[in-house]
Amino acid sequence: MTEQRNEHPVQIGKLAKQLGITTRTIRYYEEIGLMGQSERLGGGTRTYNKDDILRLKFILKLKELGISLKEMQELAENYDINQQDFHTITPKLIEILDLHISKVDEKIANLSSLRNDIVDYRVRIMDILTNQQE
Amino acid sequence: MTEQRNEHPVQIGKLAKQLGITTRTIRYYEEIGLMGQSERLGGGTRTYNKDDILRLKFILKLKELGISLKEMQELAENYDINQQDFHTITPKLIEILDLHISKVDEKIANLSSLRNDIVDYRVRIMDILTNQQE
DNA sequence: CATTTTCTTTACGTAAAGGTCAACAAAAAA
DNA sequence: TTTTTTGTTGACCTTTACGTAAAGAAAATG
């Protein structure tokens, strides 16, 4: 195994392992236009440089925050993430994050009310059980 | 339109309309064994009696509480809902409801932590925006 | 150079809960 | 009785985010 300086572009398998995802995932992100075309070696093998990797990590981060791939696509439509100007996209990103915060709040509210319903239902069923045994 | 006493069995379209679901849904529940076979008229038309309707309402209620059809199937495997002895299934149901309450609690906790992450990320992005404009 | 590992594309499969046709039969209404 | 409405089954469609397999080419290793 050759020592690899961080400057050299990396191939898909190594990158995937490094990020804990599969090669399929990376190719898929390219497929749906989230990752843009990466450089290829002579034989067609994909290679990823620092910026590509940053971008992929960015995507994974957003995913972690619950933003769907589709939403990221919309984000990319408005502001070209290709250009490495991550600074340019921040306003739109803030907007999306805000939207997500309220979505999450809403979900929490729904779940809380759901919890109450379940507990209520539980009480009613317990009553049935009790009355039945008398 | 004939006046319909509640004693008469009802056909699928009417029942669906009454419950605000589609006929496909009712047939689907039968398909996956949640509804059991209903009585048919001479020509094959399904008819539903009071107990069938109660059962369907019960299923919809559980669904409303966030219990998946698969979980209902498991419920039905252990205790035959067919037999109308809803009393018999209550202990298991209580168990499932309790399980769900903790699942919901867990989801709420996850969402809360997710919310924090998003807000943190938002702050970091705002910082980038601000520093950039100076 | 030979072998092994990794890469390529293409394309079908998966889960959940039904939606949506098609082609045809039965029930209800006129 | 003749329409019109509603019902029947069967099978393919939808969404999301990849998994998986096949067949073959390129890259890395010995």
Image: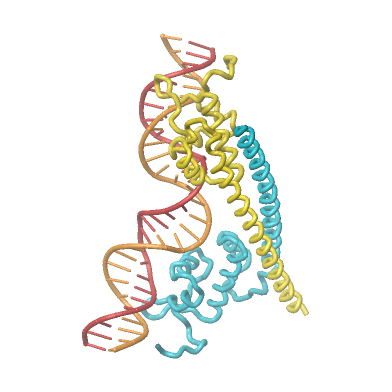
Chain colours: A cyan, B yellow, C red, D orange
Image quadrant in which the C terminus of chain A is located: top right
Residue B127 drawn at (x, y percent): 74, 75
Farthest right residue in view: B134
Query: C26 and D13: which one is in front?
Result: C26
**For residue C30, what is the image quadrant?**
top right
Query: B89 and A80: which one is in front?
Result: B89
Residue A105 drawn at (x, y percent): 70, 56
Residue B128 drawn at (x, y percent): 71, 76
Query: A55 and C26: which one is in front?
Result: C26
- Indicate whether A129 appears above or below A77: above
Image quadrant in which the N terminus of chain A is located: bottom left
Q: Is residue D24 left or right of residue A22?
A: left
Residue at 67% over, 74% down: A87
Farthest front residue in view: A134
Residue at 49% over, 73% down: A20
- Indicate whether B19 appears above or below A92: above
Q: Is residue A7 left or right of residue B123?
A: left
- Total marks shown come to 0
Residue at 57% over, 77% down: A54
Residue A133 drawn at (x, y percent): 60, 34
Residue at 38% over, 80% down: A42
**For residue A71, what is the image quadrant?**
bottom right
